[in-house]
Amino acid sequence: MVKDFRKGASLAVLSYCIWGALPLFWKMLSAAAPMHILAFRIVGSLLFVSAILLHGKNFTFLRHFREQRERFYIICAALLVTFNWGLYIWTVNTGHAIWASLGYYINPLVSIAMGLVFFRERLSALQWAAFACTSAGVIALTVMSGELPAASLALALSFGAYGLVKKKMSAGALQGLGAETLAALPVAIALIFFPFGGILGGGTVSLFGTLPDLARYSAPLWLGLLLAGPATATPLLLFSESTRLIPLSALGFIQFLSPTFTLLIGVFVFKEHFSTVYLSAFSFVWLGVLLYSISMLKKRPAANH
């Protein structure tokens, strides 16, 4: 129905706009150590999702730990999403939001490559061209800058691998997030209480780990840390609802709103330098995005049947 499509498209646009604008939120928390932000993001997401599931008397996410195969995939997903979340926060808060945007422009093409390798999916000529253009952009950036965009590639690969693992899981989006954040809870506790919270800008190593740093945080900063969970889970809930109402081909096009927002924020709000080297490399990536989007739109009639 047209009404359902409009509602689904609106929810998808809203979810990707929130994801794209999240660098503003993480930047507001930059006085906190990136690893503390990550820890509260994990704990807050678990509490927020658990409250929603328990309100609906839905306890199924706990059952997924009973089966060994499912438990393995949950742990893998938890490790991948924890790494991805932590790297994203660190990238934004160290003045490299442009790197983060590049990672999420690349991500759909990484997913295509993984589908080709692991599921023997067939690519159209446009998708091959999109993959070639995006690869050319990464190579151009590496050659012209003399530095491999490691953070961008790590973001794209970790989220692509996360999506690959999610395809193996039987849990739904919300139940899956609940299970993953529960599995990641020991990591969050370790980042708060133990010395290796000092990695990537954590606190001072001491007998009590990073707790002295937490004690020095201001009330507004604590409020922001407590809101990290809802900020993470809300766009996922909107996205999950949108997937029921519109075809994946439409989502494939809308998803590029997120890195575009992040790029604009990085350049115009954070005042990061967008050099001619970046412009040249991104031009190839944008061409790849355009070709990918066209290939997805061509699939839409079939997806609607």
Image: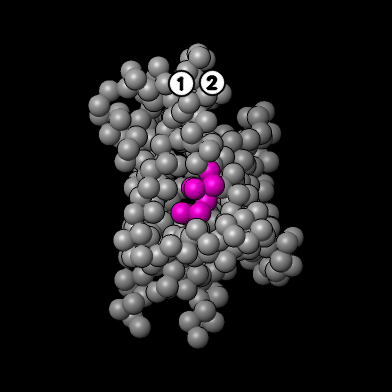
Q: Position of residue 206 (x, y in %)?
A: 50, 13
- Front-most of 252 and 288? 252
**Crowd tier of the residue under label 2, counting other residues whose Cα lies within 10 Å: few below 14, some 14–19, many 20 or above:** some
- In the rendered structure, the answer to whether residue 23 lies left or right of residue 164 reads left
Q: Verify CB contact (< 8 Å) between mark 1 and mark 2.
A: yes
Q: Quadrant of the N terminus?
A: bottom left
**Magenta portion: prevailing SS class:** helix
Q: Give the Cα separation between the discs numbered 1 and 2.
A: 6 Å
**Crowd tier of the residue under label 1, counting other residues whose Cα lies within 10 Å: few below 14, some 14–19, many 20 or above:** many
Residue closest to the far left:
219
Which residue is under mark 1?
Answer: 210
Residue 115 magenta: no
Q: Position of residue 59 (x, y in %)?
A: 43, 62
- In the rendered structure, the answer to whether residue 105 lies left or right of residue 125 reads left
Which residue is under mark 2?
Answer: 195
Quadrant for residue 244, please give it: bottom left
Colour scheme used in the picture? one colour
Quadrant for residue 56, please give it: bottom left
